[in-house]
Image (spheres, coloured by chain):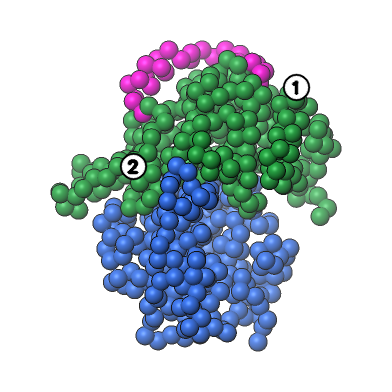
Chain colours: A blue, B green
Amino acid sequence: MADYNAMELMICVAARNLENGATVVVGTGAPCAAAMLSQKTHSPNLTIMFEAGGVAPILPSMPISVGDSRTFHKAILASSMPDIMETCQRGMVDYTFLGGAQIDMYGNINSTMIGANHAKPKVRFPGSGGANDLASLCWRTMVMTPQDSKRFTDKIDFITSPGYLSGGNSRYEAGLPKGTGPYRIITNMAIMGFDDTSKRMKVLNINPGYNRTDIQDNCGFELLWADRITETEPPHEEELRILREEVDPHRYIIGR
Amino acid sequence: MNKEVELKQGQNQLFSDPDADKAREFFRSKSRAMVNKVTTVDEAVKRLVKDGDYIAIGGFGANRIPTAVLHEIARQGKKNLAFAGHTATHDMQILVGGECIDRLDIAYVIGLEARGLSPNARRAVESGKIKLTEWTNATLSWRLKAAAMGLSYLPARNIMGTDTFKYSAAKEVLCPFTNQKFAAFPALYPDFAAIHVHECDVYGNAHVFGSTVSDQDLAKASKRVVITTERIISNDEIRRQPTATFIPFWCVDAVVEVPYGSYPGNMPYEYFSDEEHIRQWLKIEKDPEEFRKFFKKQILDTKNFYEYLELNGGIARMLKLRAIEHLTHNR
């Protein structure tokens, strides 16, 4: 079996979830690597988009900013932020990826602050950027993140970007577009989806080397479990080769 | 949606007036004359930026930013500015370094994307001395678009149900046609905007290449606009391809030719960002006293942008960044 690290596994799993012909808005880092890997394996016609306006670039290297010149290198379109966000709002964008300091059982994400006082936060993070917009307006949101019980919490300090809010039908009732929401949470330990009715996080696959106890112990809320749980398919030799040689040869992302 | 639905509103402060009639009154008196607007950075900032203004910056953080104008705002010691933090990264580092801002519309601040966080901007935001209202990148784009359209708000379908909405100054509204609930975003008419472009003529007719972020709406929405440009081109060049005119002269109050004007940021098709210099900022910001000295030497004590470029490697460095942008450098 191929030798790989957790980041490589998460990127490979994310890449497999992006089907040929789909559209995806990515940021810098692991999501961009996943989209590039997907393009170079099973989804040559995956359209990669960046929120500052780049659409379908031929990426010469990993961008350092979602607005830098790499994001529209030999692209189909170099447009604008409102154009990208309006394309999401029209329902033309299938996937996006988000990250954050905290995530709760409904897939709500905090990338704004830690503390109780918004005016004087204990720890301040950059804020939404485009994250809330993409989580609100793209059909399916995915998260790639290391899993621990501080990050996976039942007491989120600030909902920056919407998951299923308080579960059930609350996301739609809040006014967010019907049929949108978190789709997969990909961690070093497991792959989670969401229960159809309660909209609570539900384990679908367990990554090689972990068990149910590990996964629940590293989560600050009670996880649901799918009826049939299978082991995550580890990265294939060919996926690893492309990821290491073509997508991230300097190991900026997978080297961490 | 049923009719009894409760309409919520964000609880934080709105730092600018969305009134479309007041904006019309202003624009009624704004000059539309196609006259030569070429000036210096120093003069443009003196004339167009006032203490207490609401300002906004074109480009995207460290991509196509009007660095010379940002430096000059700090150098002239402008105070109590409100700032649109629309993926504000290096622009925010400069304005916070100069202690110029006291109100902040936040979409994305203090981060420098893949490069990490700015310790100094983070200290400023965590200090409680800057008033904060939350927004998002799309929301600030649409607030500028509402102003560009001459309206007082635009409805959209994001942010409802989140704390980002709760700490914004947005309001929920019902669509009069479908009864669907939307978030209403107040028009943002900045007092001042600075935008860096690839080329423009002496009247301010400008071309921009690559992603345009929100700059077309920003130019239309803002009351006073300075354009810095990599190069000034002839009016004939503008008239040869009118479909390429990205910003027309009537939006523009001042034009300044500033080659390498986005340094240390990226200027698409011209030069890449100076990652070493930006890393140096992030490192030195960890120590407030060291950063104060660095900021003084780099910005406050330099006479103008060219002294700053000289301090950081001058033309040799610029040529290296050109090679990186054009993928012709040796790694």
Instruction: Give left or right: position of B231 versus A124.
Output: right
Q: Secondary structure at mark 1?
A: loop
The image shows residue B201, relative to residue B122, as above or below, that is above
Q: Give the percent coordinates (x, y) of residue A112.
A: 48, 51
Q: Quadrant of the C terminus of chain B?
A: bottom right
Mark 2 — residue? Answer: B10
Type of amino acid at the residue the image marks with label 2? Gly
- Residue at (40%, 48%) from the top-left corner? B164
Q: Chain of mark 2?
A: B
- Residue at (60%, 16%) from the top-left corner? B46
Q: Magenta residues? A: B18-43
Mark 1 — residue? Answer: B303
Q: Give the percent coordinates (x, y) of residue A72.
A: 60, 49
Type of amino acid at the residue the image marks with label 1? Lys
The image shows residue B70, relative to residue A20, as above or below, that is above
The image shows residue A94, relative to residue B307, as above or below, that is below
Q: Give the percent coordinates (x, y) of residue B220.
A: 46, 27
- Residue at (38%, 82%) from the top-left corner? A226
- Residue at (40%, 86%) from the top-left corner? A228
